[in-house]
Amino acid sequence: MKPQMNPVLRTSPLQSTPSAASYAQADARQEPAPADKAGGRARPDDHLVSLTAPTTMEAEQYRTLGLMLEQRRHSGLLQVVGISSPTMGDGKTLTAINLAGALAQPTGSRVLLIDGDFRKPSVPQQLGLRESTGLGIRDAIVDPALALKDIVRRLPGWNLSIAMAGRSQVMPHDIFKSSRFTELIDEARREYEWVVMDTAPLILAPDCLMLGRTVDGFVIVVRANKTSREEVAEALNILGPAKLLGLVFNDDDRLLRSYGYGHYYSASAHAR
């Protein structure tokens, strides 16, 4: 039986969740991140604790998740990790960024975060990157002359690299079926110790199934008091046991309360 992974986070009540039909459409334009009045630049989401507050208890939960993955790595090939969820609003994108940040904390670590939810990319927005329409994976699919190094950017101040979705309009199934996509992931395997990829929700799109040949395993994020058991069961049935690395239970503070930490967790976030 595969072990479950249980980092515990706090999120605010969600707004309306888009339907499967609306999610399956082409990705929407992202709103720019709020400007930092002091520096005139965009701010990352406050709940990217692995990057902005690495010494907190919240960040420790992601280091625990990273340690679990390190332990699993000893038993077989594990380098490219997909982060998904049954539906929207479970917290998969925040989990992907925080996990990548936790894995990148040791000096000398080489970690690449890929915004692989090509229908609704939101990694740049949460990181506070204004260049959310910069070159990315989709552009390298269209233009084979673009190498991985041409679309990867280093996040200033953090030991983390990111590959964005990109500007070109390419349908997700054309991306995942492309041999060029496999080549880019293979290049990432050679250049980085870990590759963390934010992906589309399992129930709303077939992307994770098409990623099966390039992703070594998936961590599934479910949100306490929001994701139904039926949705979790459907998502696990879609993915299958072979690719399941474990589950992250988001917005469940029972474990923290049992250790007396509950009153410290007052932050809120809009999960994606």
Image: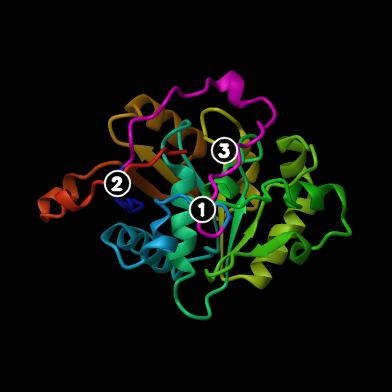
Q: Earlier in the sequence, mark 1 or mark 3?
A: 1
The stretch drawn in magenta includes residue 24: yes
User: Foreground residue, 255 or 267?
Assistant: 267
| Viewer-nearest of discs 3 and 2 | 2
Q: Amino acid at mark 3?
A: Ala
Element carrying mark 1? loop
The stretch drawn in magenta includes residue 87: no
Is residue 213 among the parts visible in the rendering?
Answer: yes
Q: Is 58 displayed left or right of 49 in the figure?
A: left
Q: Is 68 displayed left or right of 205 in the figure?
A: left
Tally of numbered discs: 3
What number is the disc on residue 71?
A: none
Q: CA distance from mark 3 to mark 2?
A: 26 Å
| Viewer-nearest of discs 1 and 3 | 1
| Viewer-nearest of discs 1 and 2 | 1
User: Foreground residue, 218 or 145?
Assistant: 145
**Residue picked out by circle 2:** 267
**How many residues crowd mark 3 within 10 Å: few (<14), some (14–19), many (20+)?**
many
**How many residues crowd mark 1 within 10 Å: few (<14), some (14–19), many (20+)?**
few
**Residue picked out by circle 1:** 37
Q: Picture coordinates of residue 99 (x, y %)?
A: 44, 58
**Residue picked out by circle 3:** 200
- Magenta-drawn segment: 11-39
- Main SS, magenta region, reads loop
Q: Amino acid at mark 2?
A: Ala
Residue name at image x 21 percent, y 45 percent: 253
